[in-house]
Image (tube, rainbow, N blue to C red):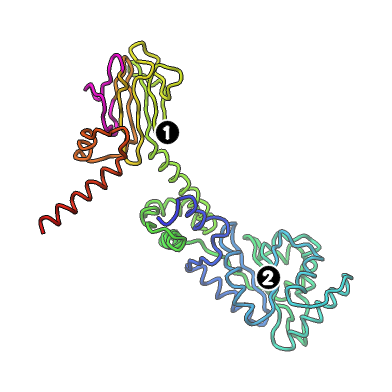
């Protein structure tokens, strides 16, 4: 994987991940065609509706650069748009150099600009995302804007997005000018299961992941599709959460764990994260064992990048691994260390080969030798042997 899991997850599915990352699917393509054809129609108005996470904002953001190639475009978020800032913002985004201070003059300037552009054959476009969240005064302004015309031609083309009842917006708020234009309405559909698989894996690959099929196998994709009901925004949220859990599980699995038991009952658990961890009866020990048969400093665990080594520290009563007394041992997963009346089970231990383990056991410099050095030494030995055979 090109980067760590959490960073990759944010890059693929986090906030703003859609910028420049487009995964097309049937409803997505149909929505783009709908917007283009509606704006080219005589009424010049389009409504795009769907629940939260349906991809409305993403589709609009993708479409804006194409629209700006042919006409001036002003874009607003209806949840944040107030009446006066919307008028001044339209003038600013349309490129009007001088914006009057007086409200009536601003409206007149906007009307003049829109009319002039329409006469020249490039009617401006107003896009309001989350239009169902507009306040009453702003809806009145939108109704006024919808009435602007030049010799029977609508002077301002309009795109509105919102939730499922967006189609009823004009009727609910008595916006008769907007109703007169008979807005075309498109309801977004969710991704199919197959589209969800393509969507998830494609975003992973584009974000830099090289094992998208491993992270998102078919059963995981189907579960995420069911949870999100196929809506891309919610699919992103669940994918981000799912990858976060994968990271947690991966981290938990990668940290060696020592489980201390007495008479079959678990009394403590320790994650082995230090380079050297002391086991003993002393209060300063990293893994404390309250047992009279355990020395104050009884044994040591040495943690390497690819293994754990147990050393007996000349204890009085000795150390057993799987019932065999030992002074030093390379531990394997689920090995049992016996100290007095206590048992220590070691989990999440990186596996190494029997041959490598025996080589480490014979090494006189065991306490200093990193297991990576052993592997490098073995590799060099094999290279030399091959050259001699040749």
Q: Is residue 110 magenta?
A: no
Residue, far top: 292
In percent of width and height, residue 312 lies at 30, 23
Image-based side of 294 in relation to 384, left or right: right
- Residue at 38 percent across and 31 percent down: it is 257
Q: How many marks?
A: 2
Secondary structure beneath label 2: strand
Q: Nearer the viewer, residue 255 or 325?
A: 325
Disc 1 designates what residue?
A: 274
Which quarter of the rendered picture does the C terminus lie within?
bottom left
Could you tell me residue 357's position as x and y percent?
Answer: 23, 37
Q: Is 301 on the left or on the right of 45, as rendered?
A: left
Question: Quarter-wise, where is residue 328 in the image?
Answer: top left
Magenta-tinted stretch: 315-336
Which residue is situated farthest in the left direction here?
389
The secondary structure that dominates the magenta segment is loop
In which image quadrant can residue 184 be found? bottom right
If the image is split into quadrants, where does the N terminus sit?
bottom left
Q: Is residue 140 above or below residue 271?
A: below
Q: Work out whether residue 193 can be spotted.
A: no
Between discs 1 and 2, the one toward the N terminus: 2
Q: Which residue in the structure is indicated by mark 2?
A: 127
């Amino acid at each position: 994987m090109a980067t760590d899991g959490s960073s990759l997850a944010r890059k693929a599915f986090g906030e703003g991940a859609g910028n420049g990352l487009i995964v097309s699917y049937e409803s997505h393509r149909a929505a783009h065609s709908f917007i283009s054809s509606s704006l080219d129609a005589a009424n010049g108005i389009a409504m795009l509706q769907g629940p939260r996470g349906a991809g409305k904002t993403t589709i609009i953001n993708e479409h804006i650069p194409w629209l700006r190639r042919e006409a001036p475009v002003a874009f607003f978020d209806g949840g944040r748009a107030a009446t006066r800032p919307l008028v001044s913002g339209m003038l600013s985004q349309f490129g009007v150099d001088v914006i009057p201070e007086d409200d009536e003059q601003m409206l007149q300037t906007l009307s003049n600009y829109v009319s002039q552009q329409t006469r020249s054959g490039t009617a401006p476009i107003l896009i309001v995302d989350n239009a169902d969240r507009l306040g009453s005064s702003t809806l009145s302004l939108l109704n006024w804007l919808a009435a602007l015309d030049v010799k029977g031609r609508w002077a301002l083309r309009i795109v509105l997005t919102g939730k499922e009842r967006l189609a009823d917006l004009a009727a609910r708020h008595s916006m008769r000018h907007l109703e007169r234009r008979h807005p075309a309405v498109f309801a977004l559909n969710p991704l199919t299961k197959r589209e969800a698989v393509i969507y998830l894996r494609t975003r992973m690959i584009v974000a830099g992941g090289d094992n998208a099929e491993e992270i998102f196998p078919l059963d995981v994709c189907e579960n995420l599709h069911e949870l999100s009901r196929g809506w891309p925004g919610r699919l992103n949220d669940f994918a981000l959460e799912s990858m976060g859990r994968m990271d947690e599980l991966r981290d938990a699995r990668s940290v060696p764990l020592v489980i201390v038991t007495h008479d079959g009952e678990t009394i403590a658990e320790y994650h082995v994260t230090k380079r050297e961890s002391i086991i003993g009866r002393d209060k300063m020990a990293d893994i404390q064992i309250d047992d009279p048969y355990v020395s104050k400093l009884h044994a040591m665990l040495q943690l390497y990048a690819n293994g754990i080594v147990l050393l007996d520290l000349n204890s009085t009563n000795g150390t057993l691994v799987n019932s065999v007394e030992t002074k030093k041992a390379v531990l394997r997963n689920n090995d049992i260390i016996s100290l007095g009346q206590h048992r220590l089970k070691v989990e999440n231990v990186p596996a190494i080969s029997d041959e490598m383990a025996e080589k480490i056991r014979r090494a006189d410099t065991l306490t200093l030798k990193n297991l990576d050095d052993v592997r490098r030494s073995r590799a060099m030995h094999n290279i030399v042997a091959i050259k001699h055979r040749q």
